[in-house]
Image: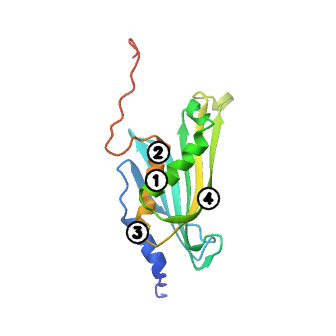
Amino acid sequence: MAPPIALPETFARAVAGLRSAAPRSEIVLEEVGAPQRLAPYSFALSAAVLRDGDEVATGRLILLHDPAGHEAWQGTLRLVTYVTAELEADLAADPLLPGVGWTWLTDALDAQDAGHRAIGGTVTQTMSTRFGDLAGPPTAGDVEIRASWTPVDDDLAPHLLAWCAMLASTAGLPPPGVTALPERRPAGAA
């Protein structure tokens, strides 16, 4: 049996920070297999955002570490994310959605004092209408946020909390401590 491979201290501290942060109760995190060919060391988490027991958004956060660093990363650590959520058709069609979606990430990083650099990504909005055997609910929309950034240090707990805040915003959850009001039904509605 081969002895365990010692992980670089920077990577070990970064993973410990990701594991130590506790998200809000509606967000369920799970460690999943990380891509092996993007960097010498990697770690990944998946997330499901639940509202009233229903999954309303999902995401993946991948930590990459290359002790030699990457010029494009401007460092040795890189966080990569993919988040998706289904939206009501009118929200998904809003031309302001990409800009708002991007601020969900940048504002969350700023609010958590999660120092970062070399941030980039895309926000994609899609509309789907089902036909034939796939006919179902009316037109539906989705938002997808793909982004990556380089943390300025290896304390990644604030980055995980920021990522969870972005997930909550994408899923339309109210801020922590705020209770959403139930939707009003018209008189006579069942």
Front-most of 185 and 34?
Answer: 185
In the foreground, 72 or 67: 72
Which is nearer the N-term, disc 4 or disc 1?
1
Q: Amino acid at mark 4?
A: Gly
Front residue of 36/100: it is 100
**150, above or below 123, in the image:** below
Label 4 packing within 10 angstroms: few (<14), some (14-19), many (20+): few
Where residue 75 appears, x then y in whole percent? 57, 74
Residue 122 locus on image (x, y percent): 63, 52
- Spot occupied by residue 164 in the image (x, y as percentages of width and height): 44, 53
Q: Quadrant of residue 69?
A: bottom right
Q: Residues within 10 Å of mark 3 (few under 14, many from 20)?
A: some
Q: Determine if residue 157 is in view.
A: yes
Residue under label 4: 120
Q: Amino acid at mark 3?
A: Gly
Identify the colour scheme used: rainbow
- Which residue is found at the position 65% from the left and 74% from the top? 71
Say whether disc 4 or disc 2 marks the residue closer to the N-terminus: 4
Q: CA distance from mark 2 to mark 3?
A: 22 Å
Numbered circles on residues, count: 4
Residue 141 placement: quadrant: top right
Could you say which disc has been placed on residue 17 in the image? 3
